[in-house]
Amino acid sequence: MELFITVAVATAAIMLIWDCAEVGRNDAANLINAVFGARVLRRKTAVWLAGVAVLLGASFSSPVMETARKGIFDPGLFTIQAAMTVYISVYIVDTVLLYAYSAFGMPVSTTASLVFELVGAALGVSIGLSEVGISVVHWAVVGKVVMAIILSILLSGIGGFLIQRVFRGVIRNNPQDRETVLLHGPWVAGLILTFLFWFMLMKGLKAVSFIQSIRTDIFDSYGVPMTLLVIWGIFTLLVHFALILSGQKGPRYLFHVTTLTGMLCVSFAFGQNDLANCASPGLSTIWLWNHADQGTAMASKIPIPKWALFSCGLFIVLGMQTRNAQRVTRAAVNTGSQFDQVALWAPQWCIKIAGMLIRPFANRSKIKSDLTPSSEISDRGKKVHYDTLRASVIMAVSACVIAFASGRGLPVSTTYVAFAAVVATGWADRVFIHGDADLKYGRAIWVVTSWFLAAIIAMVSSAIVARVVFELEIVGLILGIAVNLGIRFYVDRRSLRHEKNFRKAFANKQPN
């Protein structure tokens, strides 16, 4: 058993790095969707800026880390070997699951995958252990996390739609027009900054002593509504003076600034939330090994240092630079694009369902009002898929929802939240009722369907892998990794062929 534990720890350290890179390919790639889609920054520049914010966010991830670490199942009911088997099995499944989704440009949630993988692996190991059984899983916590994920999607979707509809109603299709921005820009930008201030600082960082003192001295004394109203007024005045002093360029780039601010906040919230999720199995395995003399229950309570989370953040940033990460970003941006023709793929059954759903709006699709953003090409000759107003709303809504959940120690999905915001703001801007509307909507249906499939695959696969590794020990570990590599090889070849075919089909669809 000692040999297995040593091999398991070495494997966990390697797969921790591996899994962080896979998270960078998929989950973290969604951090820059709005900035990239609006052509505010080049993709590489946006990746590194987001990476810095992710690393900073990792410093405040402890509540989520503890939920992911021992909230889903009780490691104290297992031996060291059994607990390590659970964590290793999660990584064997998670790395190949994320890779497969990323290879086809499909966004998937690290958080949701991890939850169901932990449940499946814990059940797989507990089979045959009569003294443990299914009670090893904290079903109440699992239900709470799943509900938090569902509610976060609904909040992001509803909030994104309503806020975008209001802001579009006043800004219209003129987010860079000087007169329009001088009139409405200050209060719109001020409201966005107020939302970010409240949810990022007062909710996301509420455990920090400095923030606690601010809440006690100001918010509790004067009331939250009145304080937020004053803060909104202050931000509005600051933005107004900044626009006046900046001359001609200020109004043109106001919503570029709010988009970048939102991206940094989303990335910070990601570091608080999703980074802790992907790091917890590997770091927990290493900490179990280092403190095995204290027992599984006690070892799982020992705090994990910030430098370990920082290191994980670096590997996530490296994963964001890969080819598959670009596919995920490109597909998500195209799904909510304001261009009529987009390069996307969706199964025919999804496209048919989408066609039936948008048919009642067919007559409206022939008319584009001044509320519908126009299709533009950037100075570098690239398509501008979102204007900066919509990009600002996507980032702000996503950041607020994730930060609020992080402050409550609830792991939620950056991917699901960001995707819901993209689709909801697209509905508000009427991008799903003209052009390739059925393809865009069909792609959204396919993505959501794949989320449910991912949960089932994660749970069943982890249970099987965990049982095999628990019974066969090192042989089972080698077998699991071999199957992982085999699936990756198959997926890589299949995805390259798929990419080539759908690009060829899109090229043939374009007018000569």
Image: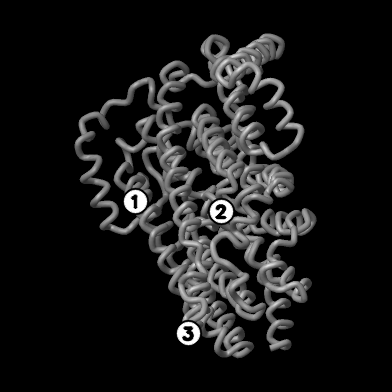
- Type of amino acid at the residue the image marks with label 1: Ile
- Type of amino acid at the residue the image marks with label 3: Gly
Q: Earlier in the sequence, mark 3 or mark 1?
A: 3
**Residue to which mark 1 is pinned:** 445
Q: CA distance from mark 2 to mark 3?
A: 35 Å
SS type, badge 2:
loop
SS type, badge 1:
helix
Foreground tag (3 vs 1):
3
Q: CA distance from mark 3 to mark 1?
A: 40 Å
Q: Residue 191: percent from the left, percent from the top? A: 56, 21
Q: Residue 176: percent from the left, percent from the top? A: 55, 20
**Residue to which mark 3 is pinned:** 128
319 versus 58 height, above or below: below
76 versus 194 height, above or below: below
Name the residue: 64% across, 37% down: 265
Point out which mark residue 236 bears: none
Q: Residue 398: percent from the left, percent from the top? A: 53, 39
Q: Depth check: 488 or 369 in front?
A: 488
How dense is the environment of label 1, judged by Cα within 10 Å: few (below 14), some, or many (20 and up)?
A: some
Point out which mark residue 27 bears: 2
SS type, badge 3:
loop
Q: CA distance from mark 1 to mark 2?
A: 19 Å
